Image (cartoon, grey):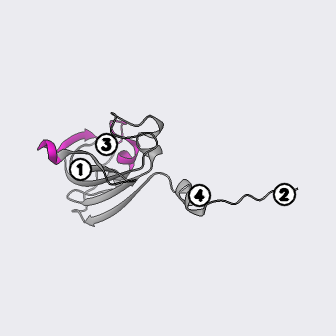
Amino acid sequence: FLRINCLDLDSVSSFLTMGVTKETSSPGNGTFPKSGDKLSMHYIGTLASNGQKFDASRDRGRPFSFTIGVGQVIKGWDEGVLQMSVGEKATLHITSDYGYGRAGAGGVIPPNADLVFEVELLGIM
C-alpha cells in the first residue's frame, strides 16, 4: 500500500535549501582569502524572518577581525566569506543550521533562526 502525503512545497523548498548563499552587490579586487587567513570586515546582521538587526560592526565604530575557516565564526561565515574577494560587498543568506541552530545566541537570535548579513571584506591582514 502506498500512502501519499500532501506537503507544503514552500516548506520542502526551504528545507532543501540549507547552508549559505551569497549575493554580490559590489565586486572586489579578485584577491580571495583562504582558510587560516585573518580578515577584517564590516557587517550588519539581521533576522531573516522580520529584518530585525541584532548586531553591526559599524555600530561599534570598528571592523570585526577573525581567522577564516577555523571555526571562530558561524559555519555560514566560514563558507560564505571564502567566496568573497577583498573589497567586495555582499549579502549572505544563512540557514539556521549554518548559523546558531537550535541554541540561538545571546538572547537576541532565537532558536532555528535564518540570518541575513550585509558584509564587506575590508582586507586580509
Does 87 sit left or right of 99 as displayed?
A: left
Q: Nearer the viewer, mark 3 or mark 4?
A: 4
Task: Give the numbered dot on residue 2.
Answer: 2
Q: Nearer the viewer, mark 4 or mark 1?
A: 4
Does 74 sit left or right of 124 as displayed?
A: right
Q: Magenta residues? A: 58-79
Residue 34 in picture, x, y percent from top left: 32, 48
Does any portion of residue 45 appear in the rendered image?
yes
Rate crowding at label 2 as few (under 14), some (14 to 19) or many (20 or more) other CA atoms within 10 Å.
few
Q: Earlier in the sequence, mark 4 or mark 2?
A: 2
Residue at which label 3 appears: 68
Rate crowding at label 4 as few (under 14), some (14 to 19) or many (20 or more) other CA atoms within 10 Å.
few
Which residue is depicted at the point 20% across and 58% down? Answer: 87
Query: How far separated are the C-alphas under marks 2 and 1?
Result: 50 Å
Residue 116 in picture, x, y percent from top left: 34, 53
The stretch drawn in magenta includes residue 62: yes
Rate crowding at label 3 as few (under 14), some (14 to 19) or many (20 or more) other CA atoms within 10 Å.
many
Residue at which label 4 appears: 12
Q: Amino acid at mark 2?
A: Leu
Q: Amino acid at mark 1?
A: Tyr
The stretch drawn in magenta includes residue 125: no
> Closer to the camera, 71 or 107?
107
Residue at which label 1 appears: 43
Callouts 4 and 2 close, C-beta under 8 Å:
no
Rate crowding at label 1 as few (under 14), some (14 to 19) or many (20 or more) other CA atoms within 10 Å.
many
Q: Earlier in the sequence, mark 1 or mark 3?
A: 1
